[in-house]
Protein backbone atom coordinates (compact mmCIF):
# COMPACT_ATOMS: atom_id res chain seq x y z
CA UNK A 1 0.00 0.00 0.00
CA UNK A 2 1.29 3.40 -0.91
CA UNK A 3 0.16 7.00 -1.08
CA UNK A 4 0.10 8.39 -4.61
CA UNK A 5 -1.69 10.76 -6.99
CA UNK A 6 -5.44 10.42 -6.47
CA UNK A 7 -5.23 9.90 -2.73
CA UNK A 8 -3.14 13.07 -2.42
CA UNK A 9 -5.99 15.14 -3.78
CA UNK A 10 -8.49 13.42 -1.48
CA UNK A 11 -6.15 13.90 1.47
CA UNK A 12 -5.82 17.62 0.71
CA UNK A 13 -9.59 17.97 0.31
CA UNK A 14 -10.36 16.29 3.64
CA UNK A 15 -7.62 18.25 5.40
CA UNK A 16 -8.95 21.55 4.03
CA UNK A 17 -12.53 20.78 5.07
CA UNK A 18 -11.52 19.61 8.55
CA UNK A 19 -9.28 22.63 9.16
CA UNK A 20 -12.15 24.97 8.34
CA UNK A 21 -14.35 23.25 10.97
CA UNK A 22 -12.05 23.10 14.00
CA UNK A 23 -10.61 25.58 16.50
CA UNK A 24 -7.07 24.11 16.26
CA UNK A 25 -6.33 23.71 12.53
CA UNK A 26 -2.63 23.05 13.22
CA UNK A 27 -3.57 19.76 14.92
CA UNK A 28 -5.45 18.36 11.91
CA UNK A 29 -3.63 15.40 10.36
CA UNK A 30 -4.76 13.10 7.56
CA UNK A 31 -3.04 9.80 6.76
CA UNK A 32 -3.87 8.22 3.41
CA UNK A 33 -3.41 4.55 2.59
CA UNK A 34 -4.17 3.41 -0.94
CA UNK A 35 -4.77 0.06 -2.60
CA UNK A 36 -5.75 -0.54 -6.23
CA UNK A 37 -9.40 0.35 -5.71
CA UNK A 38 -9.68 1.90 -2.24
CA UNK A 39 -8.30 4.90 -0.41
CA UNK A 40 -8.49 4.88 3.40
CA UNK A 41 -8.18 8.34 4.96
CA UNK A 42 -7.58 8.56 8.71
CA UNK A 43 -8.47 11.97 10.12
CA UNK A 44 -7.14 12.99 13.50
CA UNK A 45 -7.91 16.30 15.20
CA UNK A 46 -7.36 17.85 18.63
CA UNK A 47 -9.30 16.16 21.41
CA UNK A 48 -11.50 19.25 21.91
CA UNK A 49 -12.38 19.36 18.20
CA UNK A 50 -13.59 15.77 17.72
CA UNK A 51 -17.20 16.81 18.39
CA UNK A 52 -17.01 19.56 15.78
CA UNK A 53 -15.84 17.11 13.12
CA UNK A 54 -18.49 14.53 14.00
CA UNK A 55 -21.38 16.95 14.53
CA UNK A 56 -24.83 16.34 15.96
CA UNK A 57 -25.88 12.75 15.27
CA UNK A 58 -22.84 12.37 13.01
CA UNK A 59 -24.16 14.75 10.37
CA UNK A 60 -20.89 16.57 9.69
CA UNK A 61 -18.92 13.31 9.58
CA UNK A 62 -21.48 11.93 7.12
CA UNK A 63 -21.20 15.07 4.98
CA UNK A 64 -17.39 14.88 4.96
CA UNK A 65 -17.57 11.22 3.91
CA UNK A 66 -20.06 12.04 1.14
CA UNK A 67 -17.88 14.81 -0.30
CA UNK A 68 -14.73 12.70 -0.23
CA UNK A 69 -16.50 9.67 -1.72
CA UNK A 70 -17.95 11.79 -4.53
CA UNK A 71 -14.49 13.13 -5.33
CA UNK A 72 -13.00 9.61 -5.28
CA UNK A 73 -15.60 8.26 -7.72
CA UNK A 74 -14.16 10.54 -10.41
CA UNK A 75 -10.91 8.57 -10.14
CA UNK A 76 -12.71 5.23 -10.08
CA UNK A 77 -11.83 4.63 -6.43
CA UNK A 78 -13.66 3.96 -3.17
CA UNK A 79 -12.90 6.28 -0.28
CA UNK A 80 -13.24 5.42 3.38
CA UNK A 81 -12.92 8.19 5.97
CA UNK A 82 -12.09 7.15 9.52
CA UNK A 83 -12.10 9.68 12.34
CA UNK A 84 -9.45 8.79 14.90
CA UNK A 85 -10.16 9.98 18.45
Image (spheres, rainbow, N blue to C red):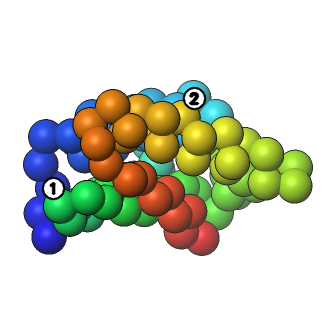
Q: Nearer the viewer, mark 1 or mark 2?
A: 1
For residue 21, side relative to residue 29 (left or right): right
Q: Looking at the image, which residue is at 21% across and 40% down?
A: 6
Q: Could you tell me how far apart the alpha carbons at marks 1 and 2 are, in whole angstroms?
A: 24 Å
Q: Position of residue 55 (x, y in %)?
A: 79, 48
Residue located 12% across and 48% down the image: 4
Whether residue 12 appears in this view of the structure is: no
| Closer to us: 40 or 24 | 40
Secondary element under disc 1, as helix, strand or loop, is: loop
Question: Could you tell me residue 60's position as x and y percent?
Answer: 72, 43
- Quadrant for the N terminus, please: bottom left
**Residue closer to the observer: 75 or 29:** 75
Q: Are marks 1 and 2 in contact (CB under 8 Å)?
A: no
Q: Is residue 36 above or below residue 68?
A: below
In this view, the residue in front, 80 or 42, is: 80
Report crowding for label 1: few under 14, some 14 to 19, many 20 or more residues within 10 A (C-alpha): some
Check disc 2 and report the residue beneath it.
20
Can residue 35 be seen here? The reply is yes
Residue at x 13% of width, y 40% of height: 5
Pointer 1: what residue? 3
In this picture, residue 44 sits left or right of residue 66 = left
Looking at the image, the residue that sits furthest to the front is 76
Q: How many marks?
A: 2
> Which image quadrant: the C terminus?
bottom right
N-term mark: 1 or 2? 1
| Classed neighbour count for the residue bearing mark 2: other residues with Cα under 10 Å, few (<14), some (14–19), many (≥20) | few
Residue 63 in the image: state x and y as whole percent.
67, 39
**Residue found at the very far right of the displayed protein:** 56
Residue 2 lies, in percent from the top left, at: 12, 63
Amino acid sequence: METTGGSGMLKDLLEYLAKSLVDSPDEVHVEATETDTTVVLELSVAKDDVGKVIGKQGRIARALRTIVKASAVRDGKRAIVEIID
